[in-house]
Image: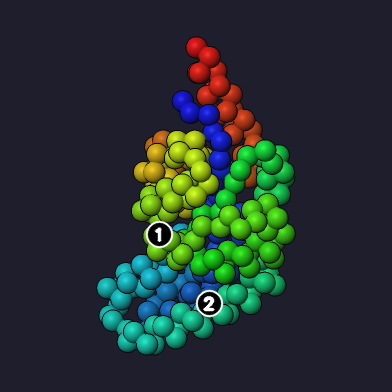
């Protein structure tokens, strides 16, 4: 068992409570484009998925939309979302406490979202200083979860082997990506009634539990090396 040396955090739904805002803006924009979509669809079926993958699936179900209309619709949606993130966003309970308790670990944010959205979310919630410029976006890397390449890229940038990293992610697509990358994975499962933590990941229900779980993993790894 490898000693954990680096922490890789998802952003939306893990550090910041942005998903209800995102779901609401997506529902408004997509429905206006002729792709029926409710906020509950995002939270239930598409949580954590890349926006264009959601659009592609909705077009498969409801018919194709003219590309320029889609481009303008997405641009308007992201502008409205940025305004709401800057004024309404809050960190998830226990995030500040967990990051303070885990201050000795190098850490980064690894998100499917654009870097500008990550920065807005961290700034609004007072989390920027915990991560600095260590923000790895799928749009920058041109690779998105559930493909493991985003987490693998993050580990490489941070200077660690995948097995030395713990990924903390709330979305199933992110958990699967980190597992496929060969990382230790903690699933922040806030919806245990509708989501099942994939085999190989450790489930927690809130961020207050994170420092204890990581301390336990570290203790187990150190003990195994001394045998």
Q: Nearer the viewer, residue 101 or 171?
A: 101
Residues packed near mark 1 inside 10 Å, few (<14), some (14 to 19) or many (20 plus): many
Picture residue at 27% right of the left edge, 73% below the top: 60
Picture residue at 55% right of the left edge, 18% below the top: 223
Q: Nearer the viewer, residue 4 or 216?
A: 4
Q: Quadrant of residue 72?
A: bottom left
- Could you tell whether 34 is left or right of 39 in the image? left
- Could you tell whether 15 is left or right of 42 in the image? right
Of marks 2 and 1, the one in the foreground: 1
Residue 190 visible: no
Please, what secondary structure does the residue beneath circle 1 have?
A: loop
Picture residue at 40% right of the left edge, 39% below the top: 182
- Could you tell whether 132 is left or right of 19 in the image? right
The image position of residue 153, as x and y in percent, is 44, 51
The image position of residue 16, as x and y in percent, is 62, 58
Q: Earlier in the sequence, mark 2 or mark 1?
A: 2
- Mark 1 — residue? 144
For the image, the number of numbered tags is 2
The image position of residue 97, as x and y in percent, is 72, 45
Please, what secondary structure does the residue beneath circle 2 have?
A: helix
The image position of residue 175, as x and y in percent, is 44, 47
- Mark 2 — residue? 78
Q: Quadrant of residue 124?
A: bottom right
Residue 56 visible: yes
Q: CA distance from mark 2 to mark 1?
A: 18 Å
Q: Nearer the viewer, residue 220 or 104?
A: 104
- CB under 8 Å between discs 2 and 1: no
Residues packed near mark 2 inside 10 Å, few (<14), some (14 to 19) or many (20 plus): some
User: Disc number at residue 165?
Assistant: none
């Amino acid at each position: 068992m490898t000693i954990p040396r680096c922490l890789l955090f998802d952003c939306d739904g893990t550090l910041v409570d942005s998903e209800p805002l995102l779901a609401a803006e997506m529902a408004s924009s997509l429905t206006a484009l002729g792709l029926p979509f409710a906020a509950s669809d995002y939270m239930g079926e598409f949580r954590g998925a890349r926006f264009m993958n959601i659009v592609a699936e909705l077009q498969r179900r409801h018919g194709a939309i003219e590309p320029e209309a889609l481009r303008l619709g997405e641009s308007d949606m992201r502008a409205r979302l940025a305004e709401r993130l800057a004024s309404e966003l809050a960190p998830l309970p226990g995030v500040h406490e967990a990051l303070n308790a885990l201050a000795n670990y190098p850490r980064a944010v690894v998100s499917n979202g654009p870097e500008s959205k990550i920065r807005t979310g961290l700034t609004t919630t007072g989390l920027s200083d915990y991560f600095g410029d260590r923000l790895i976006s799928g749009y920058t890397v041109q690779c998105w979860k559930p493909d493991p390449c985003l987490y693998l890229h993050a580990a490489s940038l941070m200077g660690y082997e995948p097995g030395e990293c713990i990924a903390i992610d709330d979305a199933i697509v992110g958990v699967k990506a980190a597992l496929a990358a060969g990382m230790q994975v903690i699933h922040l499962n806030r919806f245990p009634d509708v989501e099942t933590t994939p085999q190989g990941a450790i489930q927690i229900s809130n961020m207050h539990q994170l420092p204890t779980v990581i301390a336990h993993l570290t203790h187990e790894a150190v003990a195994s090396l001394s045998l």
